[in-house]
């Protein structure tokens, strides 16, 4: 999966012509208008689909994918992750990174520079805030918001994330 970048999750059918709403997991909503091909993760099998069209409804992209021409053909796709080939990802600025790229990074405490665990995953809360999920060395799980107060730095070369933890975190 490291050759792919998740950009959304299929949500619900839109109309009767095979269009489907996408819950975006990318900050760049406009990127959907330029898509030529996406990959759907169907039970671990990355299936390519040509994008025939894109429109927006209530700030959500609505995609029309080739070969999916009616409501019945897309009904079973709710919750399926949508990916693009990383070669077609939006270029990043200096210091920026894709969230998927930091999974597996060592998480280091700023208190004593010791490893506290490994970044296992991330999620977004209702306020569209990213929360990093860290599997700690002691077997517990910590949830660290992706804000400057807690995530102090990310070193892509060393594959580390330096964090500041507070009491109860």
Image (cartoon, grey):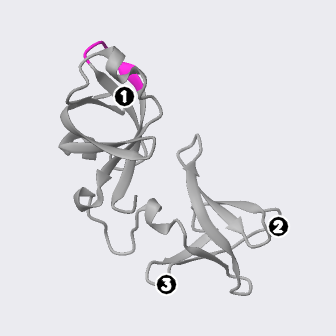
Q: Residue at x 20, y 30 (%)?
A: 66
Distance between mark 2 and mark 1 Cα atoms: 40 Å
Q: Is residue 83 left or right of residue 141?
A: left
Q: Quadrant of the C terminus?
A: bottom right
Distance between mark 3 and mark 2 Cα atoms: 27 Å
Per the image, label 2 sits on a secondary structure element best described as: loop
Q: Magenta stretch?
A: 12-17
Distance between mark 3 and mark 1 Cα atoms: 38 Å
Q: Crowding near pointer 3: few (<14 within 10 Å), some, many (20+)? A: few
What residue sits right under mark 1 in the picture? Answer: 21
What residue sits right under mark 2 in the picture? Answer: 167
Q: Quadrant of the N terminus?
A: bottom left
Does residue 78 appear in the picture of this structure? yes
Label 2 or label 1, whichever comes before in sequence order: 1
Q: Crowding near pointer 2: few (<14 within 10 Å), some, many (20+)? A: few
Per the image, label 3 sits on a secondary structure element best described as: loop
Q: Is residue 109 magenta?
A: no
What residue sits right under mark 3 in the picture? Answer: 158
Q: Crowding near pointer 1: few (<14 within 10 Å), some, many (20+)? A: many
């Amino acid at each position: 999966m490291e050759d792919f970048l998740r950009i959304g999750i299929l949500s619900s059918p839109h109309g009767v012509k095979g269009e489907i709403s996408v819950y975006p997991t990318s900050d760049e909503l406009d990127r959907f208008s330029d898509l030529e091909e996406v990959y759907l993760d169907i039970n671990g099998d990355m299936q390519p689909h040509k994008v025939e069209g894109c429109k927006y409804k209530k700030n959500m992209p609505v995609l029309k994918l080739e070969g999916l021409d009616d409501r019945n053909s897309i009904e079973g796709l709710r919750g399926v992750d949508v990916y693009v080939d990383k070669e077609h990802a939006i270029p990043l600025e200096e210091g920026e990174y894709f969230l998927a790229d930091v999974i597996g990074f060592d998480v280091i405490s700023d208190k004593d520079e010791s490893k506290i665990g490994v970044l296992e995953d991330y999620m977004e809360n209702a306020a569209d805030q990213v929360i990093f999920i860290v599997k700690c060395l002691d077997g517990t799980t910590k949830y660290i918001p992706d804000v400057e107060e807690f995530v102090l730095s990310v070193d892509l070369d060393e594959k580390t994330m330096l964090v500041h933890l507070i009491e109860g975190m």
